[in-house]
Image: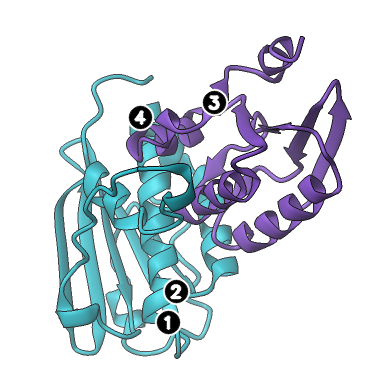
Chain colours: A purple, B cyan
Amino acid sequence: MELFAQEQAGVLVIRPAQDRIDAAGAIHFKDRMRELTQNSAAPRVVLDMSNVAFLDSSGLGAVVAVLKALAPDRKLELAGLTPTVQKVFRLTRMDSIFTIHDSLSGSMRHAG
Amino acid sequence: MRDNVTALTRAVPFPLATLAKASLMHRIFAGTAAGVRQVMKDLSSSALWRQLGDGTRINAEIVLAEVLNNIVEHAYAQISGDIDLALDMRQGQLHCQITDTGHPMPDFTLPEGAFQDLGAIETLPEGGFGWFLIRNLTEELEYRHIGGMNQLSFTLIREQSSR
């Protein structure tokens, strides 16, 4: 699972290169997220999901694990959820736990 | 319409081969994470998928991934084997039948899949969402363990619109 990371104005933006976060890649995703977030001190981490067409419950568990690992001092936010990913978050009510931005640019406006 | 009736040229172990029958889509594939990922990719680019409304397609992708992952992680935890997936349209709804030769469900019963309360961040659940999602998005969910095979069948719920 390749992840691209970029930091600007106190926000670490991470974008998965693959279009699926599923059982086959969830553990690797979690490990890479841990590395990238440990290499940065940015208080806000935004996961740009706009290229992620699919996320299963293993992928959801991995995203939740990252949120828990960053808390309480740092925050994981999500941006650009595609319809299937949005549905998984909505059905499990995880959409009430995460700060979810419509788009990456929307999340950056918050940074100001 | 038949969509690439499965690869029966492949050596398919008995008894899965006997299940091959006329379905809109029928696949037999290795019960591994990679096998599941490949079949999910194949489905998403199939002619059958293009016929489904957006809502049903999204639900089907969520449900099938959960069901197939469960088979890989539990039924085939200690042994390996194939998964047989047959899809049909019945009264305008997508019907799925999935068979494997792995370990049966504990007590031969499907997990309840109750909603997990989300409390404080430190104690958020990181798993156990699978059967909750499956049960929320399906009807006529049936499980049988028969002749050494797990057989699961269900119909995807009808979606109002193509949102």
Q: SS of the residue at dot 3?
A: strand
The disc label shown at residue B55, or none? 4
**Same chain assignment for discs 1 and 4:** yes
Mark pair 3, 2: CA separation: 31 Å
Subunit that carries the residue with mark 2: B
Q: Which residue is at a point 15% across and 38% down the rendered structure image?
A: B91
Subunit that carries the residue with mark 4: B
Q: Which residue is mark 3?
A: A99
Tell me: A12 left or right of B106: right
Q: Residue furthest front?
A: A73
Tell me: B23 left or right of A98: left
Q: Which residue is mark 2?
A: B73
Q: Which residue is mark 1?
A: B76
Q: SS of the residue at dot 4?
A: helix
> Pointer 3 and pointer 1: residues touching (CB < 8 Å)?
no
> Pointer 1 and pointer 2: residues touching (CB < 8 Å)?
yes
The three-letter amino acid code for the residue at tag 1 is Tyr
